[in-house]
């Protein structure tokens, strides 16, 4: 099959026109529907419903898609035209979810956005970073990151010849500037961070990244697009662990990266700047295989329906719990963006707002330090009766953990101290339970310290 063949060129043109029509519809729905309506319907409306004879997106569980003929196969497999070939790369069910997520991240923004779902949050981070860097490069990252992210940056990237310049004081924009040099390929920030809830000034970081013509990547897991849409403030790429609040049931492991068109980057590779998510799909994602299951996509599509409702309720409950802990004599410090006493409350008020409503809501996660020994702190987790001691968060059930001996244990004492994670810290992810029950449970556990 030769690309100069007239039939081949005609098919590529037709498939491209069909895709353009779909993209036009995508932009119209993204910019004209409310956030809640997008969460319910996404790109699946009456037209698709009649086509598939279903009121919900179909589950396409097949590992591959059949081609009409060799002409279509050649066009799609060569990436000359859009289409479906193999579920490791793309899938119709996955696409409905990915376009829905891209609508949410790019909500009412004038430019096009594209999402790529991966097998986990860490695979989304790895896919994004490794699609940009090469041996000899460095990245600049806040030291306020999830333990798994720290390990990937500090061990695996280093083994690949990529250095990480850590920013120890990420609230200070000059600390970021000092870590950037001619080999820096991107800035990375987690906001709000896990578990200390550092809230970054995304707008200022975006300006800094733009000045150096490098992309800013924001891990937005703790906020989700319900509370913060980093692309709105100039970020280039957004990452979330969709295993968390996006899919609050706890039945799915998934990650997602979303990019805007024409990210800030000086790399000349074709497509990297123009459509980063598409570039990642056709290269590292395709070749390394962090494939996303359509069965998981179906579950997340259903979970998105209630996402704004869950975020609001869990945020309201978390604020009540945080205020209780703030006034408890056995608690020395509470980290929660909604507290006026919290050191990043100003930034939280700017960035953490409910879509459509525009009112502040501060998320499901908080952490607090307990008076007493490391052992006494860990014992509180054993004494709690509601919720689970687990290395997870953002679920519809309450989950708590002792970071020093679990999620951030691998950092070691020195790096934990640098990141501000004390031995007396408990991370507490508020679920959908009645907050009064959670407060009573915490009161009982604290009485035993």
Image: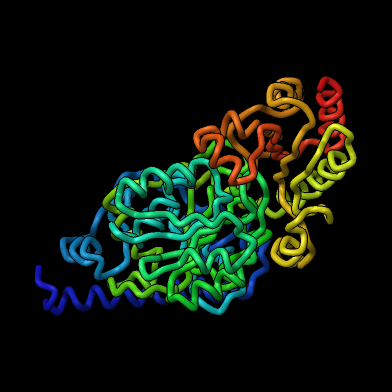
Image location of residue 292, percent across then percent down = 41, 46
Q: Position of residue 95 (x, y in %)?
A: 44, 58
Say whether residue 98 is left or right of residue 346. left
Compared to residue 7, the image places residue 414 above or below, namely above
Q: Quadrant of the N terminus?
A: bottom left
User: Looking at the rendering, which quadrant does residue 12 occupy?
Assistant: bottom left
Q: Position of residue 422 (x, y in %)?
A: 66, 37
Image side of residue 216 versus residue 422, left or right: left
Q: Image quadrant of residue 442? A: top right
Left or right of 243? Residue 86 is left
Q: Using the rendered image of the protein, determine whether residue 321 is visible from the camera's viewpoint.
A: yes
Question: Vertical placement of 25 versus 257: above or below?
Answer: below
Q: Residue at x 43, y 57 (%)?
A: 116
Outermost residue toward the left in this view: 2
The answer to whether one can see residue 51 in this image is no
Count of labels in the image = 0
Residue at (79%, 31%) from the top-left corner?
371
Image quarter hosting the C terminus: top right
Residue at 63 percent across and 39 percent down: it is 393
From the viewer's side, name the closer residue of 70 and 253: 253
What residue is drawn where x is 83% and y is 53%? 341
Position of 109 with respect to 425 (left or right) is left
The image position of residue 178, as x and y in percent, is: 51, 67
């Amino acid at each position: 099959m030769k690309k100069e063949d007239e039939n081949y060129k005609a098919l590529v043109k037709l498939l491209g026109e069909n895709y353009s029509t779909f993209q036009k519809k995508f932009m119209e729905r993204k910019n004209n529907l409310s956030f809640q309506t997008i969460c319910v319907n996404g790109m699946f409306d009456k037209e698709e419903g009649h086509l598939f004879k279903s009121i919900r997106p179909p589950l396409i569980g097949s590992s591959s898609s059949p081609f009409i003929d060799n002409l279509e196969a050649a066009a799609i497999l060569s990436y000359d035209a859009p289409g479906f070939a193999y579920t490791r790369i793309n899938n119709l069910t996955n696409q409905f979810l990915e376009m829905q997520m891209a609508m949410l991240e790019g909500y009412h923004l004038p430019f096009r956005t594209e999402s790529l779902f991966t097998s986990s949050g860490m695979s989304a981070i790895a896919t994004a970073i490794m699609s940009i860097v090469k041996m000899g490069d460095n990245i600049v990252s806040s030291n306020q990151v999830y333990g798994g992210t720290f390990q990937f940056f500090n061990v695996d990237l280093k083994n690949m010849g990529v250095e990480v310049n850590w920013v120890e004081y990420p609230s200070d924009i000059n600390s970021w500037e000092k870590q950037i040099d001619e080999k820096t390929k991107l800035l990375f920030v987690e906001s709000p961070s896990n578990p200390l809830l550092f809230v970054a000034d995304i707008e200022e970081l975006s300006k800094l990244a733009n000045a150096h013509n490098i992309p800013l990547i924001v891990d937005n897991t703790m906020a989700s697009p319900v509370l913060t849409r980093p692309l709105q403030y100039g970020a280039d790429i957004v990452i979330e662990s969709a295993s968390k609040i996006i899919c609050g049931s706890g039945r799915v492991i998934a990650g997602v990266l979303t990019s805007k068109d024409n990210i800030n980057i000086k790399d000349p590779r074709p497509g990297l700047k123009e459509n980063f998510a598409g570039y990642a799909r056709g290269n590292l994602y395709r070749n390394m295989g962090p494939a996303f299951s359509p069965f998981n996509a179906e579950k997340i599509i259903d979970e998105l329906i209630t996402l704004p409702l869950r975020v609001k309720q869990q945020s309201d409950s978390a604020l009540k719990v945080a205020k209780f802990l703030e006034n408890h004599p056995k608690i020395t410090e509470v980290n929660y963006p909604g507290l006026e006493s919290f050191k990043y409350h100003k930034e939280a008020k700017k960035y953490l707002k409910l879509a459509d409503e525009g009112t502040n809501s501060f998320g499901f996660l908080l952490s607090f330090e307990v008076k007493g020994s490391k052992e006494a702190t860990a014992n509180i987790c054993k004494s709690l009766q509601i919720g689970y001691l687990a290395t997870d968060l953002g679920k519809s059930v309450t989950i708590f953990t002792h970071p020093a001996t679990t999620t951030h244990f691998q950092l070691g004492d020195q790096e934990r101290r640098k990141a501000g994670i004390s031995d007396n810290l408990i991370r507490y992810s508020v679920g959908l339970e009645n907050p009064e029950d959670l407060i009573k449970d915490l009161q009982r556990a604290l009485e035993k310290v």
